[in-house]
């Protein structure tokens, strides 16, 4: 499944998230001081402490912008102020809304790279998201040899040399999205499962070591949220409809 770069409108009102739908949001993180101040006020104490730990101011600002945008987006679905939302972590550390928030079936995941964040939202199905800024990566094959499965390394070698860095980024975002959706985190080695990565091929989870039926449980979606970025979503089950939105401050 593939999303395009020109189909990310800002919603005119409150978006409706139907069962079987997945909403993908993009949010630009280069925001004015006034907007960053407002978003900072919406964060909880833990988020503010995490933001304060960044040594570089631009990294702190991106964290505030991404997490403030996430709160604003979830607040749209819940009909609640962003600052009123409360989060907790699952057994493997995956963030989730507290059941007291009134929407235990609303699932989400956030990723950001440089000046862009991507957020996935669904009902009753686990989701994961990843986004990466595309840049020259002469070390791509060396990293793949360490973290990719043997099947993925073989696929990468089959890609023409001029497109291998692109294939690496496609594979990396899909692997990260699956890990974040599945919730195992670092307990599942990156090399223990395979995803499609050849440019132009559909995004798919191909196999999971020791779990013959696991790949069929998940859908992968390749996204192009903006020029110079690659992104992917992983969703538990099938996707009836994918909707892409842009978040803008105040929207």
Image (cartoon, rainbow, N blue to C red):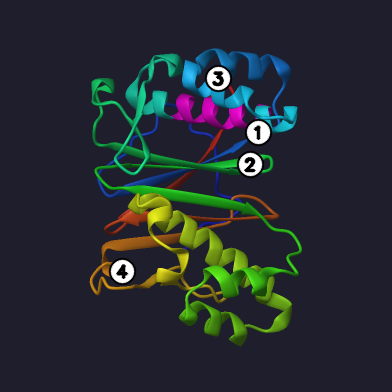
Q: Earlier in the sequence, mark 4 or mark 1?
A: 1
Which x, y percent locates residue 170?
57, 65
Which residue is label 3 attached to?
Answer: 48
Q: Residue drawn at (24%, 43%), measured in percent from left and top? A: 124
Whether residues under marks 3 and 4 lie with C-beta atoms below 8 angstroms apart, the answer is no
Mark 4 or mark 2: which is in front?
4
* Main secondary structure along the magenta-highlighted residues: helix
How far is mark 2 from mark 3, CA to CA?
Answer: 20 Å
Which residue is label 2 attached to?
Answer: 116
Q: Residue drawn at (33%, 73%), measured in percent from left and top? A: 209
Q: Is residue 98 left or right of residue 30?
A: left
Q: Earlier in the sequence, mark 3 or mark 4?
A: 3
Q: Residue drawn at (71%, 69%), measured in percent from left and top? A: 139
How far is mark 4 from mark 2, CA to CA?
Answer: 29 Å
Q: Earlier in the sequence, mark 4 or mark 2?
A: 2
Whether residues under marks 2 and 1 lie with C-beta atoms below 8 angstroms apart, the answer is yes
Which residue is label 1 attached to?
Answer: 29
For the residue labelled by badge 4, is the local secondary structure a helix, a strand or a loop? helix
User: What is the magenta range?
Assistant: 61-73
For the residue labelled by badge 3, is the local secondary structure a helix, a strand or a loop? helix
Image mark count: 4
Q: Nearer the viewer, residue 147 or 17?
A: 147
- Picture disc at residue 195: none
Which residue is label 4 attached to?
Answer: 215
Q: Residues within 10 Å of mark 4 (few under 14, many from 20)?
A: some
Q: Is residue 63 magenta?
A: yes
How far is mark 2 from mark 1, CA to CA?
Answer: 6 Å
Which x, y percent locates residue 30?
71, 32
Q: Does the image show residue 96?
A: yes
Q: Earlier in the sequence, mark 2 or mark 1?
A: 1
């Amino acid at each position: 499944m593939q999303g395009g770069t020109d189909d990310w409108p800002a919603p005119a009102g409150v978006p409706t998230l139907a069962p079987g739908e997945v909403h993908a949001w993009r949010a630009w993180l280069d925001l004015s001081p006034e907007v960053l101040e407002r978003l900072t006020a919406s964060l909880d104490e833990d988020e503010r402490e995490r933001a304060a730990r960044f040594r570089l101011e631009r990294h702190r600002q991106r964290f505030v912008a991404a997490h403030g945008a996430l709160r604003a987006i979830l607040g749209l679905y819940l009909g609640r102020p962003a600052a009123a939302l409360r989060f907790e972590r699952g057994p493997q550390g995956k963030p989730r809304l507290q059941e007291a928030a009134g929407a235990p079936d609303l699932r989400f995941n956030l990723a950001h790279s440089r000046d862009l964040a991507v957020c996935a939202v669904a009902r009753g199905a686990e989701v994961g998201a990843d986004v990466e800024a595309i840049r020259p990566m002469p070390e791509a094959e060396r990293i793949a040899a360490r973290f990719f499965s043997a099947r993925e390394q073989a696929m990468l070698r089959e890609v023409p040399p001029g497109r291998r860095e692109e294939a690496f980024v496609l594979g990396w975002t899909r692997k990260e999205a699956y890990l974040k959706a599945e919730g195992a985190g670092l307990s599942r080695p990156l090399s223990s499962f395979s995803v499609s990565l050849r440019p132009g091929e559909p995004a798919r989870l191909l196999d999971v070591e020791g779990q013959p039926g696991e790949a069929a449980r998940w859908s992968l979606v390749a996204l192009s949220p903006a020029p110079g970025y690659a992104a992917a979503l992983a969703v538990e089950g099938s996707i009836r409809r994918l909707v892409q939105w842009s978040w803008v401050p105040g929207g």
